[in-house]
Image (spheres, grey):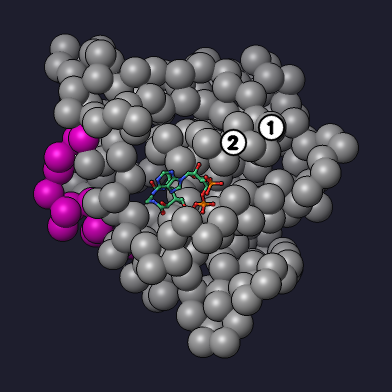
Amino acid sequence: MKYHNCCFKREWGKFTAKSLKEENITEVQELITNHFSCEEPPRKALGKPAEVMKVFDHARSKQLVVNGTSLGVFENTTGLLIAVALNCVEHRPVNGEAQMEKIGTDPSSLWWEPLRRVMKKLDGANMFTEIGASCIFFGHILSVHPAYARLGIATFLTKCMLQHAEALGCDFFVQHGTSAFTRAIGEKLGCSELRSIDLRQYVDDVTGEKPFAAAKPPHHISSLCYYKILNLEL
Ligand SMILES: CC(C)(COP(=O)(O)OP(=O)(O)OC[C@H]1O[C@@H](n2cnc3c(N)ncnc32)[C@H](O)[C@@H]1OP(=O)(O)O)[C@@H](O)C(=O)NCCC(=O)NCCS
């Protein structure tokens, strides 16, 4: 589902969080391919070539901006995009499994298969039933430009996602906690953990291998985290 009329805006000190539009796609792709593609902890552990991850993320970023629920943080003085949260909204499926993301099977996405399987394992057969959700705001990618790290931008953006989710009528915000830092934010803001996997021990059902054996603590746990969107005080 596309949310063309979404218009989120919230200011915080020198920064403003806003709904991302199609005109932002190029700068989103730059931020993601330069600072997320090879930096997210499970990807680092997987050790695939940077170029294949970048090609994949280039297309995926566009897809997640176009659906209309993604947010960016801009620096007020320079107008620069310094952080993004790429999201989607999914309603409880009437029949069958929820499909949180439609990723193509073209060659650029083949490297992603081990990651897709571990995330599917975290999602379980039907997270809607498990957590009692009817409409989920799902956070796929969270990335902050390293020059703006540790200023509280990701925490601010997470609060914005929760508010945006509420405004869109979602009853849950769900995200994969793939970095110890995003899990730290979740703990601060009161998320619950549905399931978690120690990536170092995880065995891929299809290959029999441990694709993330190189995961380095504290970023060795991936989890499915959720927030119930009720009476939030942000
Ligand atoms: C993870 C990421 C989004 C955090 O962004 P950020 O704006 O620096 O995060 P915040 O400033 O809001 O920090 C939130 C908390 O994370 C933890 N944290 C963040 N960076 C940290 C660091 N370098 N060392 C230790 N703890 C850190 C802290 O607990 C921090 O809270 P505190 O400052 O009150 O102690 C950013 O590092 C990033 O883009 N990483 C690469 C991509 C990625 O892994 N994305 C997340 C998975 S989708």
Q: CA separation, marks 1 and 2?
A: 6 Å
Pinpoint residue 67: horizontal percent, then vertical percent: 57, 58
Q: Is residue 132 magenta?
A: no
> Which residue has dot 2 on it?
186
User: Badge 1 is on which residue?
Assistant: 190
Height in image: 19 above or below 201? below
Q: Residue furthest right?
A: 231
Magenta run includes residue 48: yes
Write the start and end of the magenta stretch as one range: 45-59
x then y, percent, for residue 64: 49, 56
| Vertical side of 1 occupied by 223: above or below | above
Query: Which residue is most to the left?
Result: 49
Percent across and percent down for residue 165 are 72, 47
Q: Is residue 151 left or right of residue 217?
A: right
| Figure quadrant of residue 134 | top right
Which secondary structure is most common in the magenta stretch? helix
